[in-house]
Image: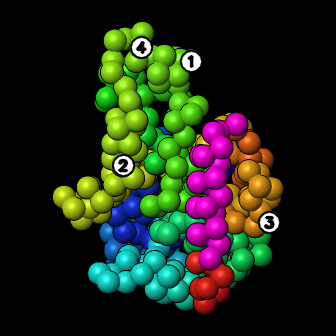
């Protein structure tokens, strides 16, 4: 019988919550948690395993890289957070040194796995993983703006009182300050935002759009200011990507993938609508966004390219 083995590198807030989300969604038959702090990984695995009776059977262990052997997907949540006064390039260079150690270890035991990078800055670290692993680009994926897109849909849901699942909206580009809310093709029940608001007697203008966009961009900061970290929504976003892969759903998600000409961008990992299935990413979907949104996407990609070119990779 085919089993689905998932390994998680990093047992911090995101890694451990991801293991919990995967366990609850009955996706994996085996979950391996690896962390430099072995006792932390062991504690998380023990805690999760003791809830096994309440879900479908799943083997959960803490281990080291050899225990990840033959994983279908390896989820990478390990990495350092940005320090006060530290630039993104400083953070990138510190995390590159960590990735130079862990990526070869992952590849050694999982030459056929799909690598799903979650650590921030995710687009850059996904490109670093691609370069260090030697894997084909379709098997190296970043969580990208899947969570940002959900935040955008949730913000619109709250503003207009509509189920978020009935809203079509995307955040594209960098998972970060240069991300783009694609208002030009945002719809509710097939109606543009302007049409929906006119039908419902809601006053909508550019200032409202700007306010919602800013709320989405700063959502993580607002959570971190209150509790110190984010973990629940990102774990659910990761679970969504994992399901699309293991179930070969061919779902269109705004994961971070290596663009090869889409929107006039080549050789940079960034987020655009992308078909995701059992082989990883299949192809980018070149959606006809407005010219200003495409220009902003290209600017965002160049920002990421410049950071990579100036890094210690």
Q: Residue at x 33, y 21 (%)?
A: 203
Q: Residues within 10 Å of mark 3 (few under 14, many from 20)?
A: few
Mark 3 → mark 4, Cα distance in angstroms: 47 Å
Residue 294 on the magenta span: yes
Residue extending furthest toward the left: 226
Circle on res. 190: 1
Circle on res. 214: 2
Q: Which residue is mark 4?
A: 198
Q: Are marks 4 and 2 in contact (CB under 8 Å)?
A: no
Q: Residues within 10 Å of mark 4 (few under 14, many from 20)?
A: few
Q: Which residue is mark 3?
A: 136
The answer to which of 158 and 210 lies nearer the viewer is: 210
Task: Give the label, 4 or 1, closer to the camera.
Answer: 4
Q: Are marks 3 and 1 in contact (CB under 8 Å)?
A: no
Q: Which residues are magenta?
A: 288-306
Mark 4 → mark 1, Cα distance in angstroms: 14 Å
The answer to whether any part of residue 131 appears in the image is yes
Q: Which image quarter is the N terminus in?
A: top right
Q: Residue at x 60, y 46 (%)?
A: 292
Task: Give the label, 3 or 1, closer to the camera.
Answer: 1
Q: Earlier in the sequence, mark 4 or mark 2?
A: 4
Q: Earlier in the sequence, mark 4 or mark 1?
A: 1
The answer to whether any part of residue 4 appears in the image is no
Label 4 element class? helix
């Amino acid at each position: 019988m085919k089993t689905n083995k998932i390994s998680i590198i990093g047992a911090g807030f995101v890694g451990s919550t991801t293991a919990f989300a995967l366990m609850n969604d009955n996706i994996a038959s085996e979950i391996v948690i690896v962390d430099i702090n072995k006792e932390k990984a062991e504690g998380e695995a023990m805690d999760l395993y003791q809830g096994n009776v309440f879900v479908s059977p799943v083997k959960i262990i803490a281990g080291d890289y050899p225990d990840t052997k033959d994983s279908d997907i390896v989820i990478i949540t390990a990495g350092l957070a940005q320090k006060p006064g530290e630039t993104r390039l400083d953070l990138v260079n510190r995390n590159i040194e960590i990735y130079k150690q862990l990526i070869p270890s992952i590849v050694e035991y999982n030459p056929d796995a799909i690598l799903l990078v979650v650590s921030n800055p995710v687009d850059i670290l996904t490109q670093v993983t691609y370069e260090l692993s030697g894997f084909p680009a379709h098997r190296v994926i970043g969580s990208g703006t899947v969570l940002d897109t959900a935040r955008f849909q949730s913000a619109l849901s709250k503003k207009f009182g509509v189920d978020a699942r009935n809203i079509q909206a995307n955040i594209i580009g960098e998972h970060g300050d240069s991300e783009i809310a694609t208002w030009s093709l945002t719809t509710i029940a097939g109606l543009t935002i302007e049409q929906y608001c006119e039908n419902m007697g809601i006053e909508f203008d550019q200032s409202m759009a700007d306010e919602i966009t800013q709320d989405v961009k700063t959502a993580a900061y607002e959570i971190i200011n209150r509790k110190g970290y984010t973990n629940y929504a990102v774990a659910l976003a990761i679970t969504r990507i994992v399901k699309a892969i293991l179930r070969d759903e061919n779902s269109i998600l705004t994961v971070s993938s290596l663009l090869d000409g889409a929107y006039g961008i080549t050789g940079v990992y960034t987020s655009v609508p992308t078909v995701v299935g059992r082989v990883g990413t299949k192809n980018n979907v070149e959606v006809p966004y407005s010219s200003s949104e495409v220009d902003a996407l290209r600017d965002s990609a160049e920002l990421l390219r410049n950071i990579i070119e100036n890094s210690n990779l």
